[in-house]
């Protein structure tokens, strides 16, 4: 198995490279894979969440045998994000994972930045209006306004455990 990823602002790429190193698997961007990974190969696909959809997954499924898939988004992990992701990104017989990546407003175009800002608006407003914010709330507000990264090696644990069972 090899890892194939798509990444717009670099968070998914970071996770893919970390995972590849830890599990000793080759890592390719979707574009690279087109020339280097033969069709129907078994892959683990990782891509950024865009409006609930894992970017690149459709392309990956068309060319490869996707045995596992992972969405990387800015939302905190939890049942809600898993439910929407599972509904929107069905890959037959493949488990689906979620990793919290980050938010890099300066690296995305203004249309996309506006789309995200519209979605996070009520949350930012509620946090800003609070007279006293807990350190966590302040951190959340800074993240939504200025961006930041939640990429951490430990987050890969469920994927690594699943991969170990395959071997
Ligand atoms: C247009 C747009 C839509 C997004 N939609 C979602 C979403 O539905 N859920 C989520 O958790 N994150 C969403 N994000 C945030 C990205 O998924 C997040 O920044 C991710 O870490 C980007 O990964 P990358 O750096 O590999 O491109 C969205 C970002 C953009 C620009």
Image: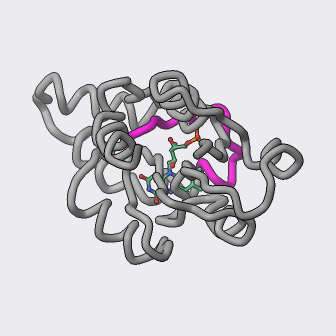
Which quadrant of the figure has residue 41? Answer: bottom right
Tell me: residue 44, above or below residue 152: below
Is residue 97 a member of the stretch shown in magenta? no
Which quadrant of the figure has residue 8? Answer: top right
Q: Position of residue 159 (x, y in %)?
A: 36, 43
Name the residue at 30% across, 62% down.
Answer: 82
Q: Position of residue 80 (x, y in %)?
A: 25, 63
Q: Residue 2 vs residue 22: left or right?
A: right
Q: Position of residue 140 (x, y in %)?
A: 28, 34
Q: Residue 156 vs residue 91: left or right?
A: left
91 and 36: which is toward the camera? 36
Name the residue at 81% across, 47% down.
Answer: 31
In the image, which residues are magenta? Answer: 99-113
Name the residue at 54% across, 33% down.
Answer: 11
Name the residue at 65% across, 46% down.
Answer: 4
Q: Tell me the quarter of the image containing the C terminus.
A: top left
């Amino acid at each position: 198995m090899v890892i194939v990823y798509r990444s717009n602002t670099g968070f998914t790429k970071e996770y893919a490279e970390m995972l590849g190193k830890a599990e000793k698997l080759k890592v390719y961007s979707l574009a690279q894979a087109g020339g280097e990974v033969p069709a129907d190969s078994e892959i683990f696909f990782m891509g950024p969440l865009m409006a609930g959809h894992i970017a690149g997954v459709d392309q990956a499924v068309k060319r490869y045998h996707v045995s596992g898939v992972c969405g990387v988004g800015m939302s905190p992990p939890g049942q809600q994000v898993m439910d929407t992701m599972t509904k929107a990104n069905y890959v037959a017989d493949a488990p689906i994972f979620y990793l919290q990546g980050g938010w890099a407003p300066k690296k995305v175009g203004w249309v996309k930045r506006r789309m995200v800002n519209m979605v996070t608006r009520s949350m930012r407003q509620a946090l800003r209006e609070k007279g006293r914010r807990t350190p966590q709330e302040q951190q959340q507000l800074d993240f939504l306004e200025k961006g930041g990264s939640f990429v951490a090696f430990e987050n890969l644990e469920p994927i690594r455990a699943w991969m170990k069972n395959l071997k």
